[in-house]
Amino acid sequence: MDRFFEWHNLSDNKKVRFAKMMLIGKSKTYWRDVEDCLEMRGKPPITDWIKMKQNLQKKYLPPVL
């Protein structure tokens, strides 16, 4: 995704919107849950690509030792 974003020079907000659109299966369900949880707590949605990427990496990638 980062290479795609470098090529197309998108804003953070557009990066997050595009990445959300590309999620499938369990990752899409997980991200909806993240957004719902933030909304229920009265917090703003994640619109920063780095924060979204870190959140997904924490969930789906093994910890770095």
Image (spheres, helix red, strand yellow):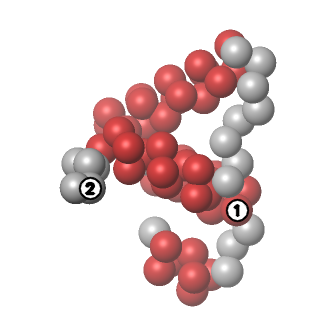
**Mark 1 sits on what residue?**
12
Residue 13's image quarter?
Answer: bottom right
Label at residue 27 = none
Q: Position of residue 7 (x, y in %)?
A: 57, 86
Relative image position of residue 30 (x, y in whole percent): 42, 30
Circles 2 and 1, Cβ within 8 Å, touching? The answer is no
Q: Is residue 22 left or right of residue 63?
A: right
Q: Nearer the viewer, residue 18 or 43?
A: 43
Which amino acid lies under the numbered mark 2 shown in the image of this protein? Answer: Val
**Local SS, label 2:** loop
Residue 60 x/y as whole percent: 30, 44
Residue at 76% across, 32% down: 44
Which is more N-terminal, label 1 or label 2?
1
* Quadrant, the C terminus: bottom left
Count neighbours of disc 1 (C-alpha within 10 A) and say few if under 14, some if 14 to 19, many if 20 or more.
some
Task: Check the image and report above or below for 35 versus 4.
Answer: above
Q: Of the numbered discs in the image, which one, if any, rests on residue 64?
A: 2
* Closer-to-camera residue (36/43): 43
Q: Residue at x 75, y 26 (%)?
A: 43
* Figure check: 33 above or below 15: above
**Mark 2 or 1, closer to the camera:** 2
Where residue 24 sits in the image (x, y, percent)?
37, 43
The answer to whether 57 appears left or right of 17 in the picture is: left
